[in-house]
Image (spheres, rainbow, N blue to C red):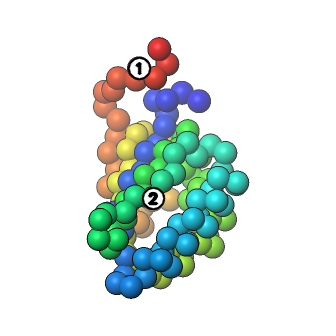
Amino acid sequence: MARHNQIHIRTEIAIEEGRLEEFKKLAVEMMRTVEAKEPDTIIYEFCFDKSGTRCVVNEVYGDSGAALAHWNGVASRTILPKILGISKVDRLEVYGSPSEELQRALAGSNAHVYHRFVWIDRSQS
């Protein structure tokens, strides 16, 4: 897949007090499901701040279709609701050139979409 078609998503999450360990278990379950069921997910990582009250999820998909597959996939339908039961999304950012279908899927999520303008990609050299 061409790298210029990639979709990058960054989600900032506030974790309820005292729920960090539960959140981490669900994050691992989410990660394993994505790894097993979503081959076009390039990067999927959970990063925690020092206090363990905030998490950033960084996601990179091969294209809009792969991002939609995640959005509609088993991990998002079964595990994500549990995660959102003990946390709150503070900010959702989408970078790239999302398809109209992906933009429609994101419409109710208060996502901030940033369309790719110019870039350098030296990864192919």
Q: Please indicate whether residue 24 sits to the left or right of residue 1 in the image.
A: left
Which of the 4 image quarters holds residue 73?
Answer: bottom right
* 22 left or right, relative to 11: right
Looking at the image, the residue that sits furthest to the right is: 36
Q: Residue at x 38, y 50 (%)?
A: 94
Q: Nearer the viewer, residue 100 or 23?
A: 23
Residue pointed to by mark 1:
122
Reading the chain from its start, which is encountered first: label 2 or label 1?
Answer: 2
Observer-nearest residue: 34 or 111? 34
With respect to residue 90, does 47 lie above or below?
A: above
* Dot 1 amino acid type: Arg
Please, what secondary structure does the residue beneath circle 1 have? loop
Label 1 crowd (10 A; few <14 / some 14-19 / many >=20): few
The residue positioned 63% from the left and 73% from the top of the image is 78
Residue at the spot x=46%, y=29% of the render?
4
Task: Please tell me whether mark 2 sits on a helix, a strand or a loop.
Answer: strand
Can you give x and y, in whole percent of width and height, for residue 125 in the image? Answer: 47, 14
The image shows residue 88 at horizontal and vertical percentages of 37, 75
Q: CA distance from mark 2 to mark 1?
A: 25 Å
For the question of whether residue 115 can be seen, the reply is: yes
| Residue type of the residue flagged with mark 2 | Phe
Task: Say how many tags the image has.
Answer: 2
Q: Which one is closest to the eye, mark 2 or mark 1?
A: 2
Q: Is residue 72 left or right of residue 54?
A: right
Residue 103, visible in the rendered structure: no
The quarter of the rendered structure image containing the N terminus is top right
Location of residue 121 in the rendering, given as x and y in whole percent from the top left corner: 40, 23
Q: Residue at x 64, y 52 (%)?
A: 35
Q: Which mark is residue 46?
A: 2
Residue 107 place in picture, x, y as percent: 42, 61
Up-down relation of residue 123 to residue 49 (above or below): above
Q: Residues within 10 Å of mark 2 (few under 14, many from 20)?
A: some
